[in-house]
Image (spheres, helix red, strand yellow):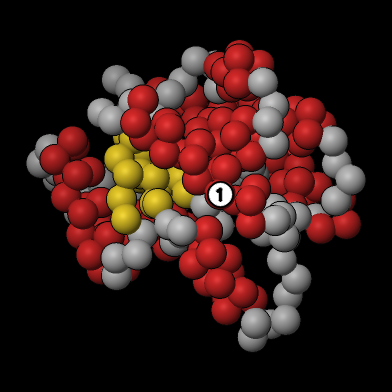
């Protein structure tokens, strides 16, 4: 029995990681068997690739190089985690997946969308999320959130956070286009709402799709 695959998408500072963690806690408290992961990353190899992609020192990275690195990390993630988890009938929550590549590399960088579609399908072995939450937020607001988050530690912005505002606006257009094309799968939510309001809406939609939880057999967590 195939499991249930939920992804969280959005621009920088949209709060998707926070909402994933909140949903994770809700599902586990209900006794559901849930795994969390992220893309890029989620595996030893993927985390090394993630470091290359986000390192601000790699500002000269070519767009095609960037795309292929994302797909390489995804291929490893699918082989190690996505396929086994879903094949076991478990629930998988993933922080970004193929939609981010369409939005960031396709709309943001201008890489050919047909090429991205073929590479996404190949790296993901044809697997697509059952449900995707797109947290829609004005990039100006999102980048200001990032700035406030990094201020206490004085950490630098990563390579993507440091891109020009126009880039982030194109990324938002990409996510909005995906939501308009696949409204049954991609649920667009206004990320200006409070964390609690967003969490409640996400919880409601996921619970409706999953149905009543069975008696809890115990849950396990796969570390990122």
Residue 94 in view: no
Question: In the rendered image of this protein, does residue 115 appear above or below residue 158?
Answer: above
Relative to the observer, which residue lies in front, 8 or 83? 8
Question: In the rendered image of this protein, does residue 98 appear above or below residue 138?
Answer: above
In this rendering, would 106 be left or right of 17? right
In this rendering, would 224 be left or right of 179? right
Residue drawn where x is 68% and y is 31% of the image = 110
Question: In the rendered image of this protein, does residue 14 appear above or below residue 86?
Answer: below
For mark 1, give the secondary structure: helix
- Residue 164 place in picture, x, y as percent: 70, 56
In this rendering, would 214 be left or right of 86? left
- Residue 85 place in picture, x, y as percent: 44, 32
Q: Which residue is mark 1?
A: 169
Relative to the observer, which residue lies in front, 107 or 132? 107
Question: In the rendered image of this protein, does residue 61 appear above or below residue 203?
Answer: above
Residue drawn where x is 57% and y is 43% of the image = 170
- Residue 160 place in picture, x, y as percent: 69, 53
- Residue 176 place in picture, x, y as percent: 42, 39
Residue drawn where x is 64% and y is 86% of the image = 152
* Residue at the farthest bottom position: 152
Relative to the observer, which residue lies in front, 98 or 75? 98
Position of the N terminus, as image quadrant, is top left
In this rendering, would 43 be left or right of 193? right
Task: Tell me the crowding category of disc 1: few under 14, some 14 to 19, or many 20 or more residues within 10 angstroms, Cα based.
Answer: some
Residue drawn where x is 49% and y is 25% of the image = 83
């Amino acid at each position: 029995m195939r499991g249930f695959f939920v992804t969280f998408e959005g621009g920088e500072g949209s709060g998707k990681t926070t909402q994933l963690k909140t949903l994770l806690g809700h599902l586990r408290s209900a006794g559901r068997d849930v795994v969390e992961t992220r893309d890029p990353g989620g595996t030893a190899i993927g985390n090394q690739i993630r470091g290359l992609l986000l390192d601000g020192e790699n500002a000269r990275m070519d767009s095609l190089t960037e795309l292929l690195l994302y797909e390489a990390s995804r291929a490893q993630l699918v082989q190690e985690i996505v396929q086994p988890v879903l094949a076991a009938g478990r629930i998988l929550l993933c922080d970004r997946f193929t939609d981010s590549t369409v939005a960031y590399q396709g709309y943001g960088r201008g890489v050919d969308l047909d090429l991205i579609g073929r590479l996404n399908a190949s790296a993901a072995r044809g697997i697509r999320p059952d449900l995707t939450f797109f947290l829609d937020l004005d990039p100006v607001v999102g980048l200001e959130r990032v700035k406030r988050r990094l201020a206490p530690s004085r950490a630098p912005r990563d390579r993507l956070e440091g891109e020009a505002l126009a880039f982030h606006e194109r990324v938002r257009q990409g996510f909005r286009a995906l939501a308009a094309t696949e409204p049954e799968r991609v649920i667009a939510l206004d990320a200006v709402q409070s964390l609690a309001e967003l969490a409640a809406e996400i919880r409601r939609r996921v619970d409706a799709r999953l149905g009543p939880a069975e008696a809890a057999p115990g849950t396990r967590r796969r570390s990122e």
